Image (spheres, rainbow, N blue to C red):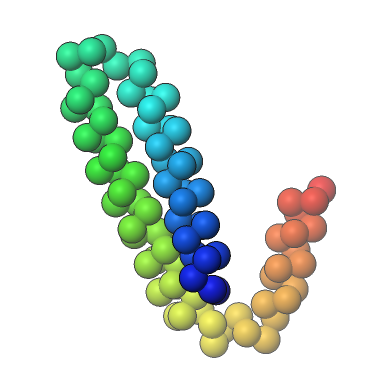
Amino acid sequence: MEIIELLLLAVSLAMDAFAVAICGSMVLTPAKRFEGVLRFGAWFGAFQAVMPLLGYLGASYLQSYVADYDHWVAFVLLAYLGI
């Protein structure tokens, strides 16, 4: 992946998390809003840091097992989504 693709992906994930955090904190009372903002930010920050790491580690570990039929796995997943 090129650096521009990584930056665009990071910005899109950040905008998604920002929108969810804003909508989630709108339902909180004004007294709990600051606590809610910190909680949403911490959860989204933690998940956005851990998920790519888990994906990389999982892909590195499973690569030798799936390399022979990975194209069939991709076909089945895309066919399922298409249906």
Q: Position of residue 44 (x, y in %)?
A: 34, 44
Total marks placed: 0
At horizontal 23% and vertical 13% (from top left) the residue drawn is 30
Position above or below: 71 against 8: below
At horizontal 42% and vertical 63% (from top left) the residue drawn is 52
Q: Nearer the viewer, residue 28 or 62?
A: 28
Q: Nearer the viewer, residue 57 or 16?
A: 16
Q: Position of residue 32 (x, y in %)?
A: 20, 19
Name of the residue lying farthest toward the front: 4
Q: Position of residue 46 (x, y in %)?
A: 29, 51
Position above or below: 27 against 58: above
Q: Is residue 28 left or right of residue 71?
A: left
Q: Nearer the viewer, residue 26 or 61?
A: 26
Examine the image and state in which quarter residue 72 appears. bottom right
Q: Position of residue 64 (x, y in %)?
A: 54, 87
At horizontal 30% and vertical 35% (from top left) the residue drawn is 40
Examine the image and state in which quarter residue 1 appears. bottom right
Q: Nearer the viewer, residue 39 or 75?
A: 39
At horizontal 44% and vertical 72% (from top left) the residue drawn is 56
Q: Is residue 18 left or right of residue 67?
A: left
Position above or below: 67 against 19: below
Q: Is residue 63 left or right of residue 51?
A: right
